[in-house]
Amino acid sequence: MNEIFHTVTPLFVGLLVTLKITAGGTAVALAAAFAAGLSRLSRRCLLRWPAAVYIETFRGTSALVQLFWFFFVLPFFGIDLAAMTAAVLVLGLNTGAYGAEVVRGAILAVPRGQVEAARALNMGPARTLWRIVLPQALIAMLPPAGNLVIELMKNSALVSLIAITELTFAGQLQRSATLQSGTVFTLVLLMYFGAALCITGGFRLMERRLARGGAR
């Protein structure tokens, strides 16, 4: 029992780091997804084109290479990021690039008649977006958004390559110390699975609440 305790404790510490990265990355991804998704729908080229460049760059390149670039290359330009900051920024921006397309698609899926009805009531574009379009689009965004957050959590394993001891790296350290590969990595799998279930449950709860609100 004492041996299991000494094996599990470092894994829980690594899990906390993974969850910290996931939470920070999700906040960055949320801001980036809405900013880029809404900019892609703008009629202004100064908003639409930079958003397109950001989305295609982060979707079209490896998250691992992005992580290395932020951590190892940016210091040559005078921008020295801490490992945790680089991890949160890269994973958040990478996930946000995919999330931007989710935002754009969900907004375009709102029936055009809803927008035309708002205009007939003399509602401005901003008020129409916040009062009519987004409340309906959010319901459609939540299922794919939950998948993206889970992907972000799993991609956090990449940050071990810039010397952050998250769950996967903690598992590797424990495997080297105990030589119990089966036990250690089974526990790591269960921890990832449990975290993913919690994320899925949270998004389903939000989805049900928004759906009830929309029905009312």
Image (cartoon, helix red, strand yellow):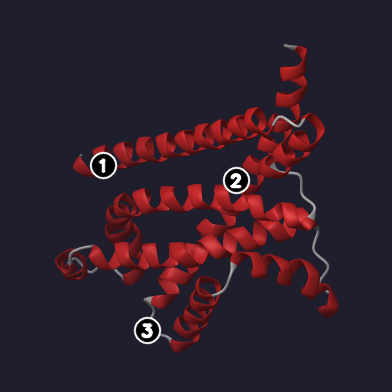
Q: Quadrant of residue 15?
A: top right
Up/down of 126 relative to 179, above or below = below
Q: Which residue is mark 1?
A: 211
Residue beneath the point at 27% across and 40% down? 213
- Front tag of 3 and 2: 2
Q: Please tell me which of labels 1 and 3 falls first in the chain.
A: 3
Name the residue type under label 3. Arg
Secondary structure under the numbered disc 1 in the rendered image: helix
Instruction: Work out how far the residue at label 3 is from the one at label 2, CA to CA, in angstroms.
Output: 33 Å
Name the residue type under label 1. Ala
Instruction: Work out how far the residue at label 1 is from the one at label 3, CA to CA, in angstroms.
Output: 30 Å
18 or 9, which lies in front? 9
Label at residue 170: none
Q: Quadrant of residue 71?
A: bottom right
Q: Which residue is mark 3?
A: 43
Residue beneath the point at 67% across and 43% down? 168
Up/down of 60 relative to 149, above or below = below
Q: Are the two marked residues, 3 and 2, in contact with CB atoms closer than 8 angstroms?
A: no
In the image, residue 179 lies at what x, y percent?
76, 32
Within-10-Å neighbours for mark 3: few <14, some 14–19, many 20+: few
Q: Are the two marked residues, 2 and 1, in contact with CB atoms closer than 8 angstroms?
A: no
